[in-house]
Amino acid sequence: MPYLTLHSPLGELTVFEADDAIVALDWGRAHGGDAAAPTPLLREAAEQLHDYFDGKRRHFDLSLAPEGSAFRRSVWAALCRIPPGETRSYIDIAREIGCRSPRAIGQANGANPIPILVPCHRVVAAGGGIGGYSGDGGLATKRFLLALEARGVSRQEAATLSLFPAESIAPAARQGTPR
């Protein structure tokens, strides 16, 4: 399966493609496989992710094909309808898709194979709690993504957030990522 690893303010992210669609985004660097030949779609995904972290993009325009049950895919589709900078509760998502269990929504969120691109970070607990986050860095990562979207902050402004040191967000971190 072709993949591409890129640098981000959250550390290295690896994007995977199958059948002309993005199927996964993992935290860290992948090894082996087909990384030597990034596809045009993987290069476009990396470009869009860089633009997102730079505050130049709020929406992604990529072919996504997360693998999961019909129920999980319906949850992930609902997540993609949450506008950047906004949040919905697990209960809101459950109501939207006709589910009686906010807990099932949380489980589908935790199983999301394409975090950030399928914005599970935009789902919070009822009553204003932040909820959980299964991505690397846990709640610190979720808070960072929510702050980045809510403020439309630039990479430099994001460096001032106490969750991530400036050196992890430096423009030099992009070196080595195909563009």
Image (spheres, grey):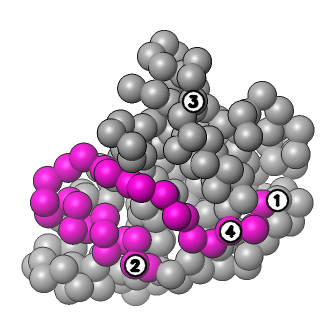
Considering the image in quadrants, where does the C terminus appear? Answer: top right
| Residue drawn at (31%, 64%) of the image | 76
Which amino acid does the dot numbered 3 rest on? Pro
Q: Main secondary structure of the magenta part?
A: loop
Residue at the disc numbered 2: 81
Of the pair 22 and 77, the residue shown nearer to us: 22
Residue at the disc numbered 4: 57
Q: In the displayed structure, does residue 159 sit left or right of residue 34?
A: right
Of helix, strand and loop, which one carries label 1?
A: helix
* C-alpha gap between disc 4 and disc 2: 16 Å
Percent position of residue 120, x then y: 42, 63
* C-alpha gap between disc 1 and disc 4: 12 Å
Considering the image in quadrants, where does the N terminus appear? Answer: top left
Asked if the stretch drawn in magenta spans residue 41, the answer is no
* C-alpha gap between disc 2 and disc 3: 29 Å
Segment colored magenta: 53-82
Q: Residues within 10 Å of mark 2 (few under 14, many from 20)?
A: few
Q: Residues within 10 Å of mark 3 (few under 14, many from 20)?
A: some
* C-alpha gap between disc 1 and disc 3: 25 Å
Dot 2 or dot 3: first in sequence order is: 3
Asked if the residue under mark 2 is in contact with the one under mark 1, i.e. CB atoms within 8 Å, the reply is: no
Residue at the disc numbered 1: 155
